[in-house]
Image (cartoon, grey):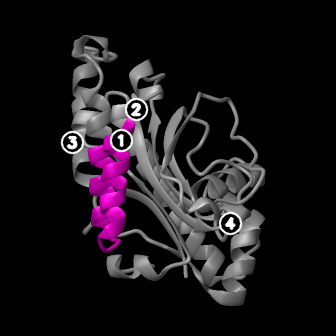
Amino acid sequence: MTVPSSELANTKACYLEFNTPNRQTHFIESTFYLHDDGTLSAQSKGNFASPYASLRFEHHADHSDTPFKPKYTPPKLTASLKKHPVIGTIWGMRFKHLPPKTIQHPSYRMQEQIVAALQQHTLARLSIEGVHQTLIEICDLLISSVPDNSLPQYADDRPDKRSERTARRHFKAHMGLSPKPFAGLNRFHEALSDITRTNTSLTDIAYDHEFADQAHFSRDFREKTGHTPAQFRQIWRKTETVRFLQDYESHPALRLGIVAT
């Protein structure tokens, strides 16, 4: 199921998650954009951005006169429970490792530059390409604040690792994801198809697609959608208004998109 990029401006809520360009992957896991009126986040008990360390720039609709505010969340072993739904807009990035302090807590000047980039985007027509480009720009601004010698180095030049690393790099360049998350996303797509097109029990769907158990299936599904499988099936049968936005041919960096119309 796909949603044209031009339709995003007319949706009640959407969540987009992207892979980062090669120049940013040394410590940025992914970037994300959430615009919500409570429709998506009310269905999820955990963070959309997972338990990774993350830096978010948030704008709450009920405080429309205030600019975007940065909020850093340190690494956690489990996702935090939401106290209330998100009503507003969040732009953010997840880190592979603990980022330098200049990124955890951007300077006032850096915050001004990022807010200016976000405000410029809100004046333009909302599109997948525009969202992705703005997130890339924000990450580049943050990276520019860090001295080169303080960035983490994760290279491993051992010969037995080089060919494996090269294979993963080529796979990611062509598919937009590394092999392991790609396989997980493919399994998720197949399970999603069964949920929406058949009356097969959720337990059978979990085992048909080789999830360890029902709890594993529910956890993986909720991390990717903000819904449990049962919640999604119930909503889908009533309204068919929750749609997934997966278009790797046009947007190879897009990992996951959820749209509520």
What residue does disc 4 label? 205
Residue in view at x 36 percent, y 58 percent: 119
Does residue 228 appear anywhere in the picture?
no
Q: Is residue 159 above or below residue 119?
A: above
Disc 3 residue type (three-letter):
His
| Near-viewer residue (144 or 224) | 144
| Near-viewer residue (9 or 132) | 9
Q: Earlier in the sequence, mark 1 or mark 4?
A: 1
Q: Position of residue 231 (x, y in %)?
A: 75, 70
Secondary structure of the residue carrying numbered label 2: helix
Q: Position of residue 96 (x, y in %)?
A: 45, 29
What residue does disc 2 label? 108
Per the rendering, the mark at residue 179 is none
Q: Which residues are magenta?
A: 111-138
- In the image, which is nearer the foreground, mark 3 or mark 4? 3
Secondary structure of the residue carrying numbered label 3: helix
Q: Earlier in the sequence, mark 3 or mark 2?
A: 2
The verdict on residue 120 being magenta is yes
Residue 183 as seen in the image, left or right of residue 210? left
Residue in view at x 36 percent, y 55 percent: 118
User: Is the residue under label 2 in contact with that under label 1 (CB below 8 Å)?
Assistant: yes
Disc 2 residue type (three-letter):
Tyr
Per the rendering, the mark at residue 112 is 1
Q: Is residue 221 above or below residue 143?
A: below
- In the image, which is nearer the foreground, mark 1 or mark 4? 1
Among the 4 quarters of the image, the one containing residue 157 = top left
